[in-house]
Amino acid sequence: MKPTYSFLFSLVTFFWCSNTSLGYSQALNDSTGFFYEKATNPKNEGDLISAYKYYLSHKEQSLKHQDTSSIVSDLRLISNIQKDLGFLYDSELSAVEALKFLDTQLTSSKSNEAKLGLYNQIGMIYRDFYNYDKALEFYNKALKLSMHSIDSIKIHNNIANVYRDKGQFELGVKELEKVFKKHFAQNDFKQLARVLDNLGFMQSKIRIPDALPNMLKAMSIRQERQDFVGLYSSYKHLSEYHKLLENKEEAIKYANLAYITAQKINSISFIEDALGLLMELDDNPNVVRFKRLKDSISKHKQQQENKYAQLQYDYTSYKQKALESEIQTEKEKSIKSLYKTIGIGLFLLGISIFFIFRYKHKEEKIQQVFVTESRISKKVHDEVANNVFQVMTKLQGANSNEEVLDDLEDIYSRARDISKELSILDFDEKFEDFIKDLMLSFNSGSINVITNGISKIDWNSISKIKKQTVYKVLQELFINTKKHSKATVVLVSFDFERGKIMIVFSDNGVGCEFKKGTGLQNVENRIKAINGTIIFESEANKGFKVKMMV
């Protein structure tokens, strides 16, 4: 497993962002600079979340002003943050979306510099997907665009890391030796420490004597500058080095230092990786077998989830050319084809009228369900909750048993919650505010709720039935997450495609072997009742995700 806090290309992003037009044409303002620091040098997961919210909002503003340079900059930072939060597929999509903007709308000299950064970012994502050949392909694309030594140094270092992952240590050492010579001119101690540490680690694999001195020198540089992320890498490599030499005492010492450093960084992924390192040094063979099996399953799963957004990007260009050809062919059709089209249109119109009446009847049935739920809500509130409250008042006056009062208060709270869940809100007002209030009610110290794209939807044009259904579905999903997922981050994104609302709900919780319980079955039934589609994605320790189209 690889820890997540890696920002190997953040410096290039800074130089590009600080020189583009409009949103980034001036020196970074206080707000942007503040969140840029959180995105590129986070102290904890909260820094990444706040930066993510900011750049999502900034991207929306850039889209409104059609500021392509700022859109690309925002997407690059968003992709970095998504990768570090563990949302690899989303990170890949954001990077590819930025590439599309570069290819279709941005033609300035800054385009190549931005494309270099995106190729490097996608290379890192493919490395995390264990697709090493694809990672090397994108690193080499980035290398061809490199005009400065500081760029090529980082890319060569990334290429060396891929060779290390593949076990091709001789090739990795050759790459890093090229980089090491260039670093003396750069005087960049952070990068020098990174190269020395990686070089020493790979040298140790092929028994080169300089291995340990190089790793110790890198550790000393990082200790002096309090580079905790770098120090974690140093301690981990030194532990693995001593383990290779069967020097168990030293291996455990550095593994414990790695664990302490991971706790200082306060990153779940670093802590998990450090505990895995300690497990490998355990004498119990079952513990070792468990760790290896877990890593093997995780690697296989990651490979399966790699959906190649780059292929989607290539396919879009091909589809555009095919569409242009199809339009030209359509112009050349005869009048006979036109008559045929009119006939088919009339036939479809008749079918449409049939389905309109059918849908209207179905809509009336759905509305009746909401009315029934509302009636039950009122009955629970008026007859159950109020009666329980009256009994509680009487018992309090009689100095009754506190345990009984606590039980009654719990029943009262549950009845009130059920009433609230089943009640119908008046969505004649601004629906967007209802959704934001719903998310705010679930946003707490333990759960961060992030929303994106809600303003894209013209909610006034959406039917009342759909708005009621969307609200109820999101409410039930949040309740499910709060009760079962143990998530710290929930992402809810909205988009509008071809007259349909696309909603993606995902969290980074424990997930599960997916089985639809009562709550999730209600979610599916509600979506299907308005002719929508819904896909659930969940697996143990892999989070929970729902995609809906209504």
Image: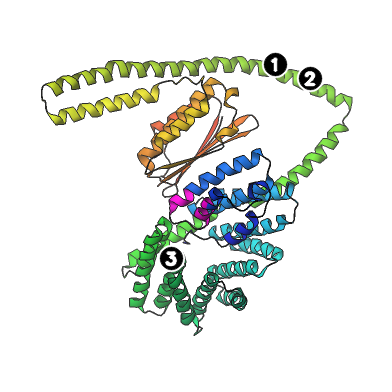
Mark 1, Cα crowd under 10 Å, few <14 / some 14-19 / many 20+, is few
Outermost residue, bottom direction?
209
* Looking at the image, residue 127 lies above or below residue 376: below
**Mark 2 belongs to which amino acid?**
Gly
**Mark 3 belongs to which amino acid?**
Phe
Question: In the rendered image, which quarter is residue 487 located in?
Answer: top left
| Residue for badge 1 | 350
Residue visible at 71% across and 58% down in the picture: 112
| Residue for badge 3 | 228
Q: Mark 1 vs mark 3: give the one in front.
A: 3
Residue visible at 55% across and 52% down in the picture: 33
Task: Please identify the dominant SS of the magenta region.
Answer: helix
**In front: 183, or 15?**
15
Question: In the rendered image, which quarter is residue 441 located in?
Answer: top left
Q: Can see residue 448?
A: yes
Q: Can see residue 89?
A: no
| Residue for badge 2 | 343
Magenta residues (range): 34-49
Left or right, 103 with respect to 181, comes to right
Color encoding of the figure: rainbow
Q: How far across and down, in percent of the image, does residue 333 sit? A: 87, 30
**Mark 1 belongs to which amino acid?**
Gly
Instruction: State the CA–CA distance, disc 1 to disc 2.
Output: 11 Å
Inspect the magenta stretch and tell me whether residue 292 lies in it: no
SS at circle 2: helix
Question: Which tag, 1 or 3, sits closer to the chain's start?
Answer: 3
